[in-house]
Amino acid sequence: MRDALIILLCVVIGSLPVVLVSAGVARRWGFGLWLFSPLPTYLFAYLVAFGVLPTIQAVFDYRAYEMLSVNHDVFVLAEILGALANYAFAAGYCMLSDRGAAAPSAELEPPAVDVRLYAARCQRVAFGFCIAVECLFMASLLQVHALTLDFGANRQAYLNAIVGAGYISLFTAVGVNLLIAGTLLAVWSGRLGKIGVVAIGQVLAVNSLITARSTVTLVIFALLFAYVMVSDRTQRKIRWDRIIAIMLAVVALGTLLGLSRLSGDPDAAIAAAVTASDNTAMRTIPPLVRPVVFLSLTFDMEVLFEQTLMNSPGPEYGSSWFEDIVYTYAPRALFPDKPVVYGTTRTQAEVAPEITGGVMLTGTFPIGIWGEAYLNFGYVGVFVTMFFLGAMLKYCYNKCLQLTYDSRVNWACVFFAVLYVAQGSNSLGYVRGFGPFLASLLATGFLLWLCLCAIRFLGRESQRPARAAPLSGPDGAPGSQATG
């Protein structure tokens, strides 16, 4: 129980700065814009990683990975560093102003007719491209027999196919970016349209069959985010009880998709999912708590942070992050000397070889942002990295909030909004593996820039378009003239 009290004390101290910043944001921006900000998802990841999972281990005498060595002093140090790092995260988040020079909500006017037509054209282009890319994705999956009703077999076939076939992952990234961009253009067009519904349904159906939980939840989050942006702009009342209910349903859906991957012997599959070893201590955990353990193991960053503090080979001065950025998306066909193990996979093999066996090629057990920061730059690196993370997330979210008051299609806002929804809204993306997150952020930004350039070019107005009748504003007056 002493360890549980230490965990509780550290979690309370560590949560305090994020809670205080959240209270200020909710007071200034409103509950909705706080709910979709990086703050609640980051706080949730911290609470599970440094609170829930360590508490389960302390109370039930359970160890997530029995083969790993344990040092009580290192455990206490990891909890303290995790708590203090939140102050650096909050400082970085507070360093930037809230929204910039936003116009008062009461003075906002609906987008003019020309802007709506332009946004609708660009939206159709984005959704059309998305459908085409998803058809290529489906064709790739059909070749490897990954579109059957056996979800577990589909998942295994998909994972086997993407090894050495990066174009399949490319189809996924481009298709999702196009879908999110088209969805967010509804801020100016006012609707998704039939083609948008088809594109969304196609992406959800295909990714459900391969149990791609992150993609399915991402699409639903993008729809909710666009809805909140439009409602904030138009001052419509939002039913937050329904929004929260949908989010809880998304969590349940992700759990069901995860369980649907289990094929063959269910007992053996669940045992393998709960722990990487023959963990007899699992028997001491009540059955009602075991699903919590199953979900908490995804947030094993504190456990591996302890291993990093004990086994770190020394400061690497950012080399692991550099390797992730340079090698992750480099095609092996063009770079045959590309290492097999690099960046995150290399550090996890160095820090926790008992789990990985020293040869694991996928990032199943990344050491997390806290561990990566310490491994690269020591104690100072933990605080500097968390400060940078808070500032980066705040900047990106500030840019995408301009969607709520810009009267014209602001492509810079669309760019940052898609980046935020695709990369920054899921805290697991950056706390579980910061190096892969940076690599994905840069690659997604480049692909997104190309996609938006194509959408703008093909969505431009023809030489002599047929002008539609002006749409009425909220008081019955035609909207003022504007261009896209």
Image (spheres, rainbow, N blue to C red):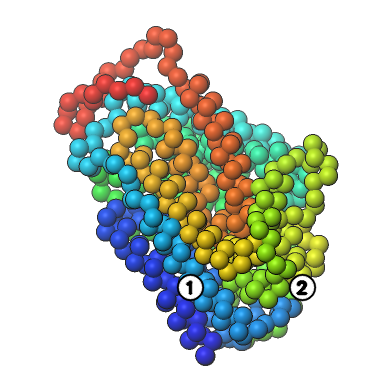
- The quadrant in which residue 143 appears is top right
Q: Is residue 396 visible?
A: yes
Residue 443 x/y as whole percent: 61, 41
157 sits left or right of 295 in the view: right
233 versus 70 height, above or below: above
Q: Can residue 36 be seen in this view?
A: no
Q: Which of 19 and 230 is in front in this view?
A: 19
Tag 2 residue: 354
- The quadrant in which residue 35 appears is bottom left
Crowding around mark 2 (Cα neighbors within 10 Å: few <14, some 14 to 19, many 20+) is: some
- Nearer-N-terminus badge (2/1): 1
Judging from the image, what secondary structure is the residue with disc 2 in? helix
In the image, which is nearer the foreground, mark 2 or mark 1? 1
Residue 156 x/y as whole percent: 73, 54
Question: What amino acid type should be assigned to the residue bearing mark 1?
Answer: Ala
18 sits left or right of 339 in the view: left
Tag 1 residue: 83
| Residue name at image x 32 percent, y 44 percent | 100
Residue 268 x/y as whole percent: 73, 71
